[in-house]
Image (cartoon, rainbow, N blue to C red):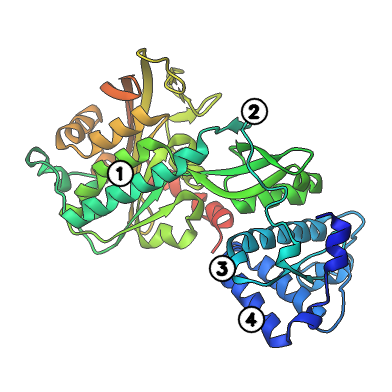
């Protein structure tokens, strides 16, 4: 259906729904979660509905002031923020009706170029038009194509859930040889109190690239865009981006995260700890103070925790997230596990960092440049002998005794599996330097 014929079939909301019915529809859309966590889109929809119920169409400046909190000096000719929010809300309504079409006889739309809502019968609206996924193509530059993402996401989600529920349901324990692991740092700092544990899984936010027909042709990972809020911020800076990219509501997690999770959970279960799980993209400030934090994932997915982890680190991220630099020696640790050839050995790196916060809850970072490094790190920190080896590599210090240090493993793998590893770097950390001003800067990023 063309835009012209669609608009010709549209009707005023008051011609189809009563005020109460329209308010109920609005509430159902808000409760569905399709408008996201931000209240701005919910407030914007309600604002448009209220005006439409009165037969009014608000002006762009009115939306800027009444909904977006701008002042009367706001210049709509120089700032496209209202148009961006309207464009995004239109897409979010499309997503809602795509999932709830079977429950509706009419749907509300925002006609192109207007700041109001209208109502159309669902049979006249091809909700799938312009949104079908096509075969992905190669992406270059700072964007990374995940051509196998559609297949990986369900598999990883099932694997993660199956691992966690199996371990919790069966009361799985660590082996007899690791009976002492719970008495060693950093686990003893996590297990000897009543604070719950929050497992933070490193995930990647994925969005779509549109062709000139409005079809999604590529799924993209951009390391500067880690959430819907980041994508919206990109749209705010450049409204032309709204015609090129689309929020797909997709997140990706590497396979190694599930296998690493299976190593860590039994240690927590041995002490009967209460376990919560969240994605890095959903981590908030309050969690950092009320839980012991255990991160599991790639170094590249640390996102909001990256500043803390590297605040006092002797390492820094190199040219890519597959490379770490030793600040003191200048050594370069570069993984070649990204795309190893079949039956060819490869080198990867596993990173482990732990430190207490100012609230005395413990942070444990179990990470890797790729799967092999991540899996080995999880295996090592769940093993009492490996933890003892870490202690021997560190000079006795108050930081070590307080559970504040970092290590790096060089991992050798074959066919995507880790077979051998060497501890190549270890260093104690100063919690005071980690938290000196870092938490306040994180609060601004994470939100309430």
Mark with earlier residue (1, 3)? 3
Task: Tell me residue 321's x, y (percent).
Answer: 50, 29
Q: Residues within 10 Å of mark 4 (few under 14, many from 20)?
A: few
Q: Which residue is located at x 51 percent, y 46 percent?
A: 251
- Which dot, 2 or 4, sits closer to the camera? 4
Cα–Cα span, label 1 and label 3: 30 Å
Q: Which residue is located at x 51 percent, y 47 percent?
A: 304
Cα–Cα span, label 2 and label 4: 43 Å
Q: Between residues 51 and 6, which one lies in front from this camera angle?
A: 6
Residue tagged 4: 24
- Which dot, 1 or 3, sits closer to the camera? 3
Q: Which residue is located at x 42 percent, y 57 percent?
A: 288
Q: What element carries label 4?
A: helix
Q: Is mark 1 on a helix, strand or loop?
A: helix
Q: Is residue 34 above or below residue 397?
A: below
- Which dot, 1 or 4, sits closer to the camera? 4
Q: Between residues 379 and 248, which one lies in front from this camera angle?
A: 248
Report whether 167 appears left or right of 312.
left
Residue tagged 1: 261
Q: Between residues 178 and 260, which one lies in front from this camera angle?
A: 260
- Which dot, 2 or 1, sits closer to the camera? 2
């Amino acid at each position: 259906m063309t835009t012209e014929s669609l608009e010709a079939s549209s009707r005023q909301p008051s011609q189809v729904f009563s005020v109460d019915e329209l308010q109920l529809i609005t509430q159902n859309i808000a409760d569905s979660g399709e408008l996201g966590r931000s209240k701005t889109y919910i407030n914007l929809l309600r604002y448009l509905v209220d005006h439409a119920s009165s037969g009014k169409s608000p002006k762009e400046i009115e939306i800027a002031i009444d909904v977006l909190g701008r002042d009367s000096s706001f210049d709509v000719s120089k700032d496209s923020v209202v148009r961006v929010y309207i464009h995004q809300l239109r897409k979010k309504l499309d997503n809602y009706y795509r999932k709830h079409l079977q429950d509706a006889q009419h749907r509300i739309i925002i006609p192109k170029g207007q700041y109001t809502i209208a109502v159309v019968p669902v049979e006249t609206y091809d909700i799938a038009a312009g949104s079908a996924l096509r075969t992905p193509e190669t992406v270059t530059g700072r964007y990374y194509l995940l051509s196998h993402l559609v297949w990986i996401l369900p598999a990883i989600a099932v694997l993660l859930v199956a691992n966690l529920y199996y371990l919790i349901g069966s009361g799985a324990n660590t082996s007899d040889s690791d009976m002492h692991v719970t008495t060693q740092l950093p686990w003893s700092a996590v297990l000897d109190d009543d604070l719950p544990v929050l497992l933070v899984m490193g995930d990647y936010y994925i969005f779509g690239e549109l062709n000139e027909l409005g079809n999604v042709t590529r799924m993209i990972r951009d390391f500067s865009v880690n959430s819907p809020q980041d994508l919206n911020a990109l749209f705010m800076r450049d409204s032309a981006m709204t015609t090129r990219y689309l929020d797909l509501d997709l997140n990706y997690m590497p396979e190694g995260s599930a296998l690493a999770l299976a190593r860590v959970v039994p240690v927590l279960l041995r002490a009967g700890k209460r376990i919560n799980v969240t994605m890095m993209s959903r981590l908030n400030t309050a969690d950092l103070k009320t839980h012991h934090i255990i991160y599991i994932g790639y170094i590249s997915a640390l996102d909001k925790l990256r500043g803390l982890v590297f605040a006092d680190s002797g390492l820094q991220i190199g040219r890519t997230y597959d490379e770490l630099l030793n600040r003191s020696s200048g050594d370069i640790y570069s993984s070649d596990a990204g795309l190893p050839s079949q039956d060819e050995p490869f080198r990867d790196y596993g990173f482990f960092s732990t430190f207490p916060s100012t609230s005395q809850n413990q942070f444990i970072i179990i990470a890797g440049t790729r799967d092999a490094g991540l899996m080995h790190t999880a295996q090592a920190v769940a093993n009492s002998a490996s933890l003892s080896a870490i202690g021997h590599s560190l000079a006795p210090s108050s930081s070590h005794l307080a559970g504040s240090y970092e290590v790096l493993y060089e991992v050798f793998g074959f066919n995507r599996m880790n077979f051998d590893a060497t501890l190549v770097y270890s260093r104690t950390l100063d919690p005071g330097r980690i938290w000196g001003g870092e938490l306040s800067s994180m609060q601004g990023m994470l939100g309430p």
